[in-house]
Amino acid sequence: MILKVVIVSPKYQNNLGYIARVSKNFGIRQLHIVKPRAKLNGKDAIMYSKHAHELIEGAKIYPDFRSAVKDCDIVVGTTGVMLKAKSDFRKVYLPDQLVSQLKKIAGKRTKVALAIGRDDTGLSKEEMEMCDFLTFISTNPEYPVLNVSHALGIMLYVLTDKKLSQNFALDDQNRPNKNEVEALFKVFDRVIEKKRIRNRKTVKTTFRRIIALAQPTLREVHALITALKE
């Protein structure tokens, strides 16, 4: 599994510094930042990042969330508010449950985006809709919301565990590439557009999540395309 850390619109320099430190602790070599609000070369960002400031200096910047995750096979979003996440037929996983799912469907070359939301408002509803999985870290209900850097540290701990990296179920040789999966989605979208469905967007999003969970082989993707084509 290839892990890509995506930080969405960080607001505070100290959090950005801590994010860099904890990322370096777990071997992350590059940060991917969506529309940063914090000054990347600010005094606090430099001070709090300590010996990991090169991750901020070398970060790849994106104008929006979609462009940051478009090259990924699986997108994992984090949330500190369970009710906000539990909408549109969505299941929210605890970190250990998420790892169990990834063990079943990820290959060695599967690119997984771990998305950390804004340090003041988290991921937006639209950004959550682009995620294949959502994960929630259970904490004290009297003070449930973690600092973004703390949440990132917990997620990196479980996602970089050697037990996960040694247990990939999917044979990468039989894995469809991004374009082949997108071809399946386009065929499905054309079918849905011809039907009388009140909320087409929800149906399309649900289908995408099912495919992400199933991680079909190349042969299975081709079979689905054949079945859906008119």
Image (tube, rainbow, N blue to C red):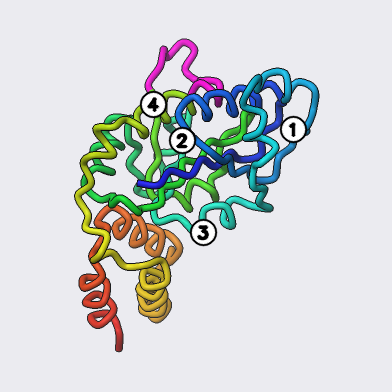
Of badges 4 and 1, nearer the viewer stands 4
Instruction: State the residue at coordinates (21%, 70%).
Output: 220
Marks 2 and 4 close (CB-CB < 8 Å): no
Mark 4 residue type = Tyr
Where disc 4 sits, the SS reads helix
Quickly name the residue at label 4: 157
In the shown orientation, is residue 184 left or right of residue 166? Answer: right
For residue 100, what is the image quadrant? top left
Where disc 1 sits, the SS reads loop
Where disc 2 sits, the SS reads strand
Quickly name the residue at label 3: 70
- Tell me how far mark 2 sits from mark 3, CA to CA: 17 Å
Mark before the other along the chain sequence, 2 or 4: 2
Mark 3 residue type = Lys
Mark before the other along the chain sequence, 3 or 1: 1
Mark 1 residue type = Ala
Marks 3 and 1 close (CB-CB < 8 Å): no
| Front in this rendered view, residue 63 or 166 | 166
Mark 3 is surrounded, within 10 Å at the Cα level, by few (under 14), some (14 to 19) or many (20 or more) other residues, namely few
Instruction: State the residue at coordinates (78%, 32%).
Output: 41
Q: Which residues are magenta?
A: 138-151
Quickly name the residue at label 2: 78
Mark 2 residue type = Thr
- Tell me how far mark 4 sits from mark 1, CA to CA: 25 Å
Residue 71 to residue 179: above or below? above
